[in-house]
Amino acid sequence: MANVVILGAGVAGHTAAAFLKKWLGRKHQIIVVSPKPDYNWLPSNIWVGLGRMPAQSVVVPLKPVYDKVGIVFKQAKATSLFPEGSAAMDGPHVEIEYTEAARSGQHEQVAYDFLINATGPKLRFEATEGLGPDHFTLSVCTADHATHAAHTFLENVEAMKRGESRRFVVGTGHGACTCQGAALEYVVNLESELRRHGVRDKAEVLYLSNEYELGDFGMGGAHIRKGGYITPTSIFTASLFAERGIDWVLQAHVEKIEQNQIFYTNLEGEKHTLNYDFAMLLPPFSGVGIKAVNARGEDISAKLFAPNGFMRVDADYSAKAYEDWRAEDWPKTYQSPVYPNIFAAGIAFAPPHAISQPHFTKDGLPIFATAPRTGMPSATIGKIIAESIRDKVRGVNHPLRTASMAKMGAACVASTGAGLTKGSAASMTVFPIVPDFETYPEYGRDLRFTMGEIGLAGHWTKLFLHYLFLYKAKLLPGWTFIPE
């Protein structure tokens, strides 16, 4: 019997666990370790964060789902990895610390034959003084964060109904942030909700980002084909903001936040202060901080993990100038180059380089959008890793499955306002995610499959996907027919 341990139960981890159990059956053990008891469909946190949905509409309790199909669930976090075994236990294993109330703080050694690191990111609010729900700003990174944001947003709406004015600032809270797409969704939905509540005239709405241009999204932006025209996402986004009366500040690194004040530096090195009444600023990400130890008890974390804590996989991590990177340098199998029975999926793998052009102040401070690895790519990567492990467990002599982000397309439906009759969303496809200028020298992408449209149909699509993917997360009948 093979033991497959999966660290994390987000999109990548949950997808890998579900397919492995389906393919390997009860002869082999699938163990999922996650510090949270629920699966959170993150794209809909945007709506929770404005009071359009309750938190329970975007989460699925994991244990009942896993009990139903025979997956072992441990509500815990991984603390140390022993890929060669240790004095305490022979063979590869991971040390976990339980987070569930009944066993909080207890440790356990969990053996594995194969391990998938799908832990996702650590939310590094501490990287910026005053950032985060425990301090002065809000977040939609978790369902609980989004609930708090909604409560604060609606309090501000009530104040505006009494005649008071408000400034809303939405964006990124550090110069090294990713997930600008989530910030964009939130700011345009916020503006839409202000109109719905009849208080738009009392509000100033501002988008604050580390992006060099609007619509960069950490992937160097894109050129989209629509109606015979080719439009860069910078213009697409600027047009949307201009239509909605949303102002923007770009190339910004937030240094400190105080009550009602944001202090930031721009790429020119200039210091600025921005007043606010409501601020939802996303944090930078890092790996969760798992320690790796060899059989001699030596710390080998630097061999398995990049300095940012994300796991090294089959990518080219050599030092190169940005202009020298190629699409081929991106990982394909997501297998550790040090231990072949370890893989990393989704946000947990270390990207070899930035997709967007890096920019620095004259003092060397980096201010640019870092590479995204969420959503559809995460699920696809989780599935192909599961296929590779399935083949190995079955003894099938088959090359590892591949899913390079430089060979993979992605579809995104970004909400720009909720409502069955007045909602809208931007529907976009991009191919490939990582630009390949050798294959597509003009734009880096195939414009036959890179396109975008905005309208009510997009909102209906996003709402349909919300229910569809929650259905899939519950592993209900026919879930395998729903694509990643």
Image: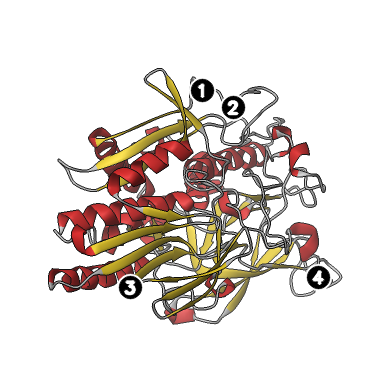
**Mark closer to the chain start, 2 or 3:** 3
Q: Amino acid at mark 1?
A: Leu
Q: Which residue is mark 2?
A: 443
**Mark closer to the chain start, 3 or 1:** 3
**Inter-mark Cα distance, 4 to 1:** 47 Å
Question: In the image, residue 134 lies at what x, y percent?
Answer: 43, 79
Q: Which residue is mark 4?
A: 299
- Residue 89 in the image: above or below residue 205: below
- Residue at 56 percent across and 49 percent down: it is 212
**Mark closer to the chain start, 4 or 3:** 3
Question: In the image, residue 462 lies at what x, y percent?
Answer: 30, 41
Q: Tell which residue pokes out farthest to the right in this image.
A: 296
Q: Which residue is mark 3?
A: 277
Crowding near pointer 3: few (<14 within 10 Å), some, many (20+)? some
Q: Secondary structure at mark 4?
A: loop
Label 2 with label 1: CB-CB less than 8 Å: yes
Q: Which residue is mark 1?
A: 447
Label 4 with label 3: CB-CB less than 8 Å: no
Q: Is residue 298 left or right of residue 52?
A: right
Crowding near pointer 1: few (<14 within 10 Å), some, many (20+)? some
Give the foreground label among 4 and 3: 3
